[in-house]
Amino acid sequence: MNDFAIINLKELDDSVSARVPGIEGRFGRSHLGSEHLGVSHFRYAPAMRASGGHHHTEQEEVYIVVAGSGRILLDGEIHELRLWDVVRISPTVVRAVEAGPDGLEFIAIGSDRPEGGDGHQVPAEWPD
């Protein structure tokens, strides 16, 4: 493995929109060759709300809003998101995202994960 890697997240294949229309997702961990960090790019269409959420067993995540606005559901509590907000999420917190009227784009950074991943999909129960 090299001591460094340079990739362009927007040039990676979108591996989400075929399964979830309205959400694009590009995952960079394997392209970076990183043992410790995952970096992903997500783009939500305007007013797109994730019907499902997820949490992790071990992996902590950070989301950085790079375009648009929206809301994030964290363990049943809604928080507004705006440009350049950074959200740190402990592994066990259930999270789901909703884009605002101009859509939402963010970078997700994940820490070490066990072999095969540790994400668990769950229903998202938006209170409104």
Image (spheres, rainbow, N blue to C red):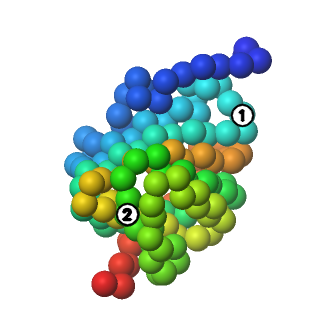
The residue wearing badge 1 is: 35
Q: Position of residue 82 (x, y in %)?
A: 45, 60
For the N terminus, the quadrant is top right
Residue at image point 63% right, 61% down: 88
Q: Position of residue 21 (x, y in %)?
A: 23, 49
Q: Amino acid at mark 1?
A: Glu
Looking at the image, which residue sits at the far front?
83
Which mark sits nearer the N-terminus, 2 or 1?
1
Q: Amino acid at mark 2?
A: Gly
Q: Position of residue 91 (x, y in %)?
A: 64, 63
Give the SS element for disc 2. Answer: strand
For the C terminus, the quadrant is bottom left
Looking at the image, which residue sits at the far right?
3
The one nearer the camera, 68 or 112, is 68
123 displayed left or right of 32: left
Q: Which mark is residue 70?
A: 2
Residue at image point 68% right, 30% down: 34
47 displayed left or right of 96: left
Whether residue 119 is visible: no
Looking at the image, which residue sits at the far top?
2
